[in-house]
Amino acid sequence: MNYYKKIVNVLLELGRTYPECNLGKHIATAVDSSSTKDDLWGMSDEELFNSLKEYQLSKELDFRYDEAEIDRIISDGMHLNRILENDEYEEDY
C-alpha cells in the first residue's frame, strides 16, 4: 500500500474517532509540528503520513479526567505520608 492510501486511511480513522474535528483541523494540527510545515507543498507523502500517525497517537494518548478523579489524585498526594506510614489506610474508590 502506498503512502497516499495510508494517509487516506489515517484520515478516515481520525474522522470516525474524532468527528468533532474537521479534516482541515486534523491536517493542520498534524503538520504544525512537522519540520517541513513551512513548505507544505514540498512535503512528501511519507512525511505527511508520519506526521498524521504521530498526531493520531498523541490524540489517543490525550484523555480527560473528570473533576472528581483529579480531586482524588490531589487528595491522595496530599496524604501520601499517611498512606505510606499506615498499611491499614484504605481509600474508598
Image (spheres, rainbow, N blue to C red):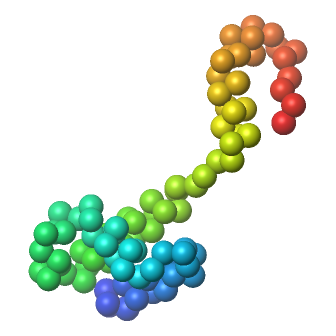
Give x and y (percent) for residue 4. Answer: 32, 90
Is the residue 43 above or below the residue 68 in the image? Answer: below
- What's the residue at 37%, 84% (across, down)? 7
Q: Nearer the viewer, residue 46 or 20?
A: 20
> In the shown orientation, is residue 88 left or right of residue 17?
right
Is the residue 92 above or below the residue 60 in the image? Answer: above
Give x and y (percent) for residue 20. Answer: 54, 75
Residue 2 sits in quarter: bottom left
Asked if residue 56 shows in the view, the reply is yes
Report the residue that reaches farthest toward the top.
Answer: 85
Is the residue 16 above or below the residue 31 in the image? Answer: below
Give the quadrant of the N terminus: bottom left
> In the shown orientation, is residue 80 left or right of residue 13?
right
Asked if residue 13 shows in the view, the reply is no
Residue 23 sits in quarter: bottom left
Figure label count: 0
Give x and y (percent) for residue 41. Answer: 14, 82
- What's the residue at 60%, 52% (across, down)? 64
- What's the residue at 58%, 55% (across, down)? 63
Give the quadrant of the C terminus: top right
- What's the residue at 17%, 63% (across, down)? 35
Give x and y (percent) for residue 26. Answer: 40, 74
